[in-house]
Image: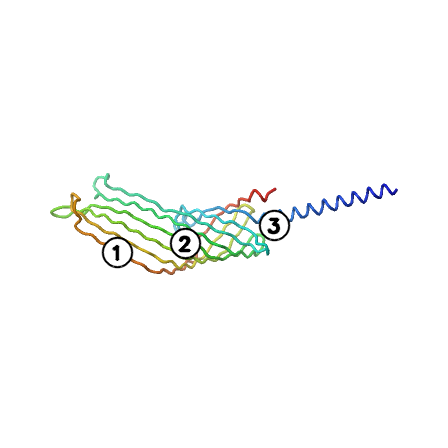
Amino acid sequence: MTKKIAIGLTLAFVISFATKVHGQEKEKKIKDSTRNWEVGLDLLWLIDKNQLPATSFFARHNFTTKTGKQRALRFRLGVNNSYYDSSQISGLLPEKSNIIAPFVRIGYEWQVPVNNQFTFFYGADANIFFYQNKYERIVPAAPTDFLVRNTFTTWELGLIGFIGFKYRPTNWLSISTESTFSALYRIKRDELASYSLPPTIPNGLGEINVNDMRINFLPITVINLSFTINNPKHEN
């Protein structure tokens, strides 16, 4: 009888210990599951209402602080690039335009869950934007035509505050929208030049320099469609 009681107590202890460990691992796994990546795109370009380049890429790294607060690091990269050349088109004046406009935003996000599907969030992004357009065209004139060569360059640096909410219909899919308030310092440099043909000595040179602060509010800046990618080290 004593032996049976000892065996029973031993089994009870093992089961209790295993259950406790399993519960802790389950709790840890649930907690760690908040550490994940979301990657996605802005959908406003589908209706031609995008405020950012249609090719921009968005990423959000969600995590939980030691005090149990939900936070996220945010990244957005994008670029607009276009090239136009009418010199080979019959009936059109020769004209060329080469535009490149990359930008990057890096920010921090505070999250306030409403329930399992809705989350309210706010925060700020640091913004760096560059735009350059190298433009060239032929201007007919008498007694000689002119070649116009212009370079338009713009930098925008500043902060963008945002506020929005996110809806998660499934664990791997989310839709979010944001309103933004931006304060951006713009540095604009336009270099203008014209040459009589054939282009030897420039007939005219000019430069336009503009430095200003731009304040803007957009009620709907983006509508992000994002897919969740769990962090592999927290899935075991």
* Vertical arrangement, residue 69 with respect to residue 196, above or below: below
Tag 1 or tag 3, which sits nearer the N-term? 3
User: On the image, numbered disc 3 is attached to which residue?
Assistant: 31
Q: Which residue is drawn at 29% across and 58% down?
A: 210
**Looking at the picture, how far across and down is residue 30, in whole percent?**
62, 48
Count of labels shown?
Answer: 3
Q: Name the residue under label 2.
A: 127
Q: CA separation, marks 3 and 2?
A: 32 Å
Disc 3 vs disc 2: Cβ atoms closer than 8 Å?
A: no
Secondary structure beneath dot 3 equals helix
Residue matched to label 1: 208
Tell me how the rendering is colored: rainbow
For the residue pair 159 and 50, the one nearer the viewer reads as 159
Sequence-wise, the earlier of marks 3 and 2 is 3
Which amino acid type is shown beneath numbered disc 3?
Lys
Q: Give whichever of discs 1 and 2 has the lower sequence position.
A: 2
Looking at the figure, which quarter contains the N terminus?
Answer: top right
Q: What element carries label 2?
A: strand
Which is nearer the eye, 32 or 217?
32
Label 2 crowding class (10 Å Cα cut-off): few <14, some 14-19, many 20+?
Answer: some
Q: Quadrant of residue 90?
A: top left
